[in-house]
Image: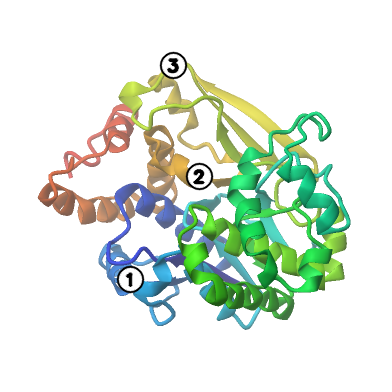
Amino acid sequence: MKVIHTSYYGVDYLWKEQFYVQLLSALYANRHYDNIHLYSSDIIKKQFEEVGSPYTSIDTSLFKPKDNITYSVPKLLTYQAQTEPFLHLDGDSILFNKFTFEKTKSPVIFSHPDMEGFRDLQASTVSEFIPKLITNLKKNINNKDYNFISEVYLDLFLKLHSHHDKNILEFFNFSFIPNMAVVNVQDVDTFKAAVEYSLKHYKKTKKEVDSSKYGAHYLEQLLIHQHLTAYSEEYRLAAIREETFMVAKAPLTVQTNQSTEIKNVSWPFSFNTSYKCKCCVNQSKTKHTLKCVESLTNFLSFDFGGYTHFSYLQWNQLFQVIVIAHIVDNFGEEVMLNAHRFFKQRYKQRGLPEYSEAELYYELLRDNGLFTKS
């Protein structure tokens, strides 16, 4: 199975926290599946080659600067370019364990539901479904707050309503909108048809989508899902059977708003992991608590139940310490140091710290000078 990353951020290289997480994601994917291919820019390609590329191949031919306005467009172009079954991982998604996707009956498998708690909404037509959300009838729909789902998906959908074909409207359903941090595609033709519908829609509505804060979510996660729901009975039935997700809830969440800086963390620090049990198909959710920074020592080899999607939490220095530990322990100190050296001089030139909090705390917890004495 072909494994893929897409990283395209215009004219700059990946920043340290992004790079460390994506490096670990690529290293594990290559270990599990014997390949990992990157679709990216010349700048990011050069960055990985200078550090020591973990990639089987790096393709810079797909994207142009104009593709970067709505940031999901490069991913859609990567999807469109595939001709065989594939596994696409976001750079902030890590498979600590190898997952076997072929046994699942769904033609496409995604990471997890993007909007939890909306599976009670199973209206058969858009005319029945949308008014409930517009009027925000909290008491009538299990006391759910629909403001966020309206902001992320519904507002733009309504604004561009006339651009959708009849089948999309007929089978409209928010209930199983996926988060596409992981995308495993077995039925390439069906998935590509959905991607091409989304890209065609984007070409017609580019101005509105580009100006929307959540245009990337709308274009990728809503429209691809809606097309699959409308045109693939196999996918639609798999969604009803809840077979379209790796895990039932977001794999990593923090319980309270916390600073990304360790020095400003309010202790105890708690986070939740959701994962599928290694021994059975049951879903598990576990709360973890760090009483102080020293207790992080017990989490340096933590595997998050086999899979996690860091998302914005990749910037949190506590999780960065775990990422660093995984790179060192599983792929060697030199791999980690090569990545660190890439940033050291560049950050110094920009007036940024040569060492991150995570690097310094890793040294403290491991009682070594891996970075400062290298």
Residue pointed to by mark 2: 310
- Which residue is at a point 78% across and 65% down the rendered structure image? 169
Q: Is residue 254 left or right of residue 43?
A: right
Find disc 3 in the rendering and name its residue: 267
> In this figure, which residue is indicated by the disc labeled 1?
45
Q: Mark 2: which secondary structure? A: loop
Please indicate, yes or no, whether residue 78 appears anywhere in the rendered image.
yes
Please identify the quadrant where the N terminus is shown: bottom right
Q: Earlier in the sequence, mark 3 or mark 1?
A: 1
C-alpha distance separating marks 3 and 1: 39 Å
Q: Give residue 242's mark.
A: none
* Quarter of the C terminus within the rendering: top left
Sequence-wise, the earlier of marks 2 and 3 is 3
Q: Amino acid at mark 2?
A: Phe
How far apart, in angstroms, are the residues tagged by discs 1 and 2? 22 Å
Closest to the observer, 219 or 87: 219
Residue at horizontal 34%, vertical 27%?
262
| Amino acid, disc 1 | Lys
